[in-house]
Amino acid sequence: MQRKLFLMASSATLAAAIATSAYAQSSNTIEELVVTAERREQSLQDVPVAVSAFTSERRDLIGITTIQDMTNFTPGLQYSTQLDRTSVRGVGRLTNVHTAQGAVAIYSDGIFTSSTVEAGKTPLFTDRVEVLRGPQGTLYGRNSIGGAINVISKRPTEEMYAEIRAQLQNYNRTVLEGAVSGPTIIPGVNFRLAANWDKQREGWIDNIVPGQPDEGNIIDTMIVEGQLQFEFGENFDGWMKLATYRWENGSGGPGARYTWTPHPYPTYQAGNAAIALNPGYACRPGLTTNVVNPSPAGCVNPAINDPRKIASIVPYDVDLDATVIFASEWIWHFDTMDLKYLAGGTHYHYYLNGPTPVEQAPIQEFRFLNLLAPGTPGALVRPRYEFSYEEIKNWFSHEVNLSSTHDGPLQWLGGLYLYLEDFEQPVSTYFPDEPAASGAFLTQTTCVFTGNACAAPIGRIYDNKPKFSISSKAAFGQIDWAFAETWKLTAGLRYTKDEISGTESLRLLCFDVQACSGGFPPEIVGNNLIDLTQLPTVISGYIPGQPGSPGVTQGVTSLTTVDPASGFASRNYENSWTATTGTVGVQWEPDTDTMAYARYSRGYKAGALRVGIDTTISSSPNSDPEYADAFEVGLKKNFGPSLQTNVAVFHTKYENAQVPISIVPTGGGLAQVQSVFYNIPAAVTQGVEFEGTWQPIDNLQILVNYAYLDAHITEASGVIDPTDPTAVASGANPTGPLQTCAANPTGSCDVFTGNVQRGQNLDGDHLPNAPEHKFTFNVNYTWQFGDSSLTASGTYVWRDEQYGSIFDREYYKSPAYDQVDLRATWKGPEDRYSVIAFVRNVFDELGYEGGAGAGRRAGFVPAFALGQPGFAARPVVEGIASTYPLTPPRTFGIELQYRFF
């Protein structure tokens, strides 16, 4: 770290020395940046909100090409490329269950979108990106409890303009894009057309299995976007945008593999908690026959010694099919006010396929030992599970607002908002080598526990099909009153009603998993699918006529029924929530270079239902809404034309954070673990944020960003850590004494340790993905050569350690890391062309997008394999494996930009 800081400081000193020589030009002041963070155009320094803004010119200059880059220059902002999840100041989304909305509202040209991908478009498409930190419950409302990201597209021009850009990078990546804009043959109508094609053929992650593709940003994406802008006389104008996206990726894009698990393969794990002689176990010599292992590393995980190597026989595949985005804005200008109508929506179909479990040894097949008939072949098993995940969504939003445009002391804005969405989120797991799942491999389906008739075998082991509709209605208003020469009061309110309704259908089967085979080994059960769908622990006992079946719970509007033909269990859901949020603040401007403010804001995020993805039909699917009460003071100060500083100090009371967590209902034996939404009763997120731009001499700029963030839980008890269910790991804070299952037969037994699972007290534990310290330093200098220029830019980023869970445990912690990026930009005469050379992550350091995930490697083996007499299965725990989400390795390339007009 010291070496990198020295490198950056030396570069700044050298640039300063050169600047005092013959290259010095006239004073180059810090430009004023106009933003629309408060839904009207204002100077960034006049907005009483903590906001970071990035113009397309600034992004090109210092190298902000991805959303992850924005996190480096935005205090409090975190983003996961793999999960497409955003958080601000520790407030974010911790699940892909779509009924649980994001905590950071994303608006593209005023239209809400449920994906952050729009914010990552290249500078060719975007005029600027604004990141508002803290609850924005008045003007942005929906899902803005953590903050909001406002993406503003480049608009059509009145004069002809055309530009092409091309990039060539390592890992055989090419980017081609272009835009053309100008007037049409119709007076008052201008157009813009832009397109992008991005293809990377070599992955950041080397798959050592022969014939299998590499992974890590294997992408083939295309964007085409068209715009029309209208001027219908002096009072009426409008704008429309229509865009389409296509992804035909391998392991690249949201959902693909960007992780590192430096742990031996889960030797005893085939599915969830596998029985004897599973694929990993089959790697042990002399215990099985006919094992086919295509990995040159055998059963050694290559990631142990190299974080960018894997051995996998099931590749990831990420696709986006025929996604269409529409946005429009229509404005009628009155003498003293504007009436604006915003309308837009998206049709979105996303596919993801990959292996599960992700980090299992790449065994294609093996045979069980036939313990019933020694000397004869046992069952042949092709054990690899594969998952399929889809999001099929349609959403549309309308907003009508009326805002003042006069110069008086009282400014105001009010409006109505409507958001409508329907989505399907089917997810399934299956055996890719046994698509029929009804032949010699899986001969029949049995319902060994319920005694009820079972439907015919299907190819999917787990199959969940949620279909839901969401609506959000709101009315809002805000006033800004300059009640004195240097003082202004801001006050706003928003009333919101959110509704959700839908149906979930599930079928759950298993094979080769001890926990769902009644304790019998495979040589007893045979090659059978075990249908668990009708188990009360799977469908929560909501079976009409079953003795002791409880009534429906909150959010559930029907009993669970099982279709005997398909075998699916289904039930209906409906719930609604309302909230009043708002803001009140005061700002003081004693001079044109100083603005101080104090502000209170209340944020809200709708409740959620735990449905789909990785759940059974839970007995407690409902989750209450989240609330945040934020108090913030800030100072925005310009010290002459050469130094600009923005400081914000904040304290937020955060209630009911929605966390997907596993619990075990009270009961002995092999009780099924249930996945529920848990509301953390209380948490606090507080800290200090600093952004500074200093131009000490002509053509030299230094950017500094620093954030201190203390985001921790203040009240939560009785929560079970799924990686340490008996709360014995270092740092655990259990709420009760350790008991054996025999001593407490009514407790939830952990069969792998023989002890009862224990909840923990989480008071003081961190919120996930919230590094305590984050620091970014950029220095850039421009040399003038007649009518051309050369700009050199260097960026140093340091990010503190962070946790990927609500439990502060070492196995959930990602280490601190730093990174250096370098960039050089040559601009030709009249800015007709630019040539950019860049190196990102110069020292090829391991960086971490967020905290780590973790899982316990546990399963069953026969007693003889453990040196014990007999063949009965014995539970074994082989430790905990941590999985770290990685940032990209060293990348470098060159970009050519050419402008025709």
Image (cartoon, grey):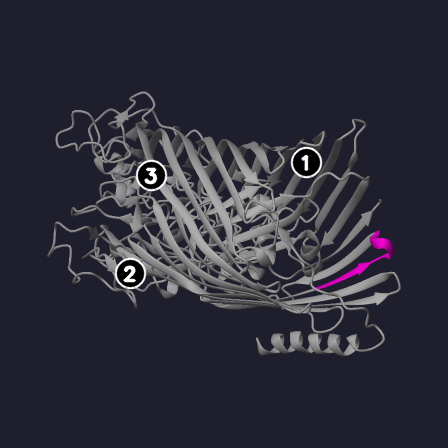
Dot 3 amino acid type: Phe
Q: Mark 2 highlights which residue?
A: 762
Dot 1 amino acid type: Glu
Dot 2 amino acid type: Leu
Distance between the Cα atoms at labels 1 and 2? 48 Å
- Tag in front: 3 or 1: 1
Q: Residue at coordinates 79% horizontally, 52% vertically from top-left?
A: 896
Residue 423 shown left or right of residue 720 in the figure: right
Q: Which residues are magenta?
A: 823-832
Q: Residue at coordinates 47% horizontally, 37% vertically from top-left?
A: 388
Q: Mark 3 highlights which residue?
A: 511
Task: Count neighbours of disc 2 (C-alpha within 10 A) and say few if under 14, some if 14 to 19, many if 20 or more.
Answer: many
**46 and 705: which is toward the camera:** 46
Q: Residue at coordinates 24% horizontally, 54% vertically from top-left?
A: 874
Q: Earlier in the sequence, mark 1 or mark 2?
A: 1
Q: Quadrant of residue 847?
A: bottom right
Task: Tally the marks.
Answer: 3
Residue 51 shown left or right of residue 191 in the figure: left
Q: Position of residue 816 (x, y in %)?
A: 49, 68
Q: Is residue 314 visible?
A: no
Q: Mark 1 highlights which residue?
A: 225
**710 and 49: which is toward the camera:** 49
